[in-house]
Amino acid sequence: MTLLVAITGWDPDPWLDRFRALLPDRPVVFADAPHDPTAIRYAASWKHRPGSLAGLPGLEAIFSLGAGVDHLVGDPDLPDVPVLRVVDQDLTERMSEYVVMHCLMHLRRGWLYAERQQQGLWQDERDQPAARDIRVGIMGLGILGQDAARKLAIMGFDVAGWSRSPRDLDGIPTFAGESGVSAFLSRTDILVSLLPLTPATRGLLNLTLFRGLARDGRLAGPILINAGRGGLQVEADILAALDDGTLAAATLDVFESEPLPAASRLWTHPAVQVTPHNAAMSDPDAIASAIAAQIRRHEAGEPFRHAVDLRRGY
């Protein structure tokens, strides 16, 4: 009943230590160290090398070590076993904190006043809308999107959501599918993207979509907040939309290439706020504990939880 830890880009030793402490009755091995492939029953992955999980005849499940699973779905040789994502309350709450904070910063012109402080400029803005005057649209109504929507609504924002398949959120209007995109965008002043990255969503945040956003809002223009995945956005289109006024501002936590290249104009554009993919940092101890609990439940005859539909990519 060996657990294989398959990681690139992170130091594997802390993960090995966590799993060995949580699962002391079984071997925990690193994918790049010598091991018996026939003994592997579970794999915990973060950006494993494509094909490196093939050739494990006893594999029963693959666990993602992060919130996303696009690094798994992109492996053409991924074994045909359940793929399980992490659902962690701490991560959910951190994401909602980020979304609420940045919606409030745009509402209350926090970036403008920070700039004026540096200039020593005392200048008030008399046209100050309230949260109830601002329509926030959340694309992606999974666990993260639903929690953020509820907390924005508590703050008073006029919230709606869009997802690829219909969702029902108490007190929050929802739109779904291609037929719902236009109506959703046309009532959105601040667009928040929390979508997973799939073949259907790659490049979705583009100039055509931005042009569908509301033009009659109380802010200076539509605003984009992307804390989902960098592959969702077309950065050249974001810059073009900011330059021609289609977008008034953008807050970006994720990028097409990470770290964001030093030459990117997103660093210096006056209407862009950049954060270094830290909107919702995963708690490694919580993730390891959740995976260990999944293994224990499975071995007690209970079904796995939070399985990914590989056809959809989430």
Image (cartoon, rainbow, N blue to C red):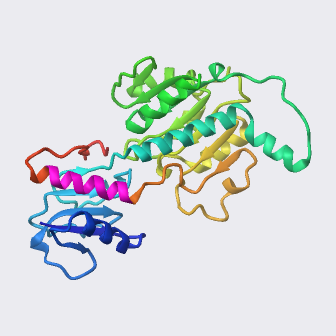
Vertical relation: 201 (above or below) 75: above
> In the figure, is residue 177 to the left or right of 203?
left
Quadrant in which the C terminus appears = top left
Vertical relation: 30 (above or below) 238: below
> In the figure, is residue 297 to the left or right of 175?
left
> Residue 178: x percent and y percent?
40, 27
Look at the magenta stretch and give its main secondary structure.
helix
Residue drawn at point x = 38 percent, y = 51 percent: 68
Residue drawn at point x = 44 percent, y = 35 percent: 145
> Residue 295: x percent and y percent?
18, 55
Question: 137 or 41: nearer the eye?
Answer: 41
Question: 183 or 26: nearer the eye?
Answer: 26
> Residue 220: x percent and y percent?
74, 29
Question: 221 or 85: nearer the eye?
Answer: 85
Magenta-span inclusion, residue 291: yes
Magenta-span inclusion, residue 188: no
Exactly how many numbered labels are in the figure?
A: 0
Residue drawn at point x = 38 percent, y = 37 percent: 143
> Residue 238: x percent and y percent?
62, 44
Vertical relation: 221 (above or below) 99: above
Is residue 293 visible from the viewing direction of this image? yes
Which span of residues is magenta-colored? 285-297
Q: Outermost residue toward the bottom?
A: 34
Quarter of the rendering containing residue 311:
top left
Vertical relation: 310 (above or below) 25: above
Quadrant in which the N terminus appears = bottom left
Residue drawn at point x = 18 percent, y = 51 percent: 82
Is residue 246 visible from the viewing direction of this image? no
Question: 21 or 294: nearer the eye?
Answer: 21
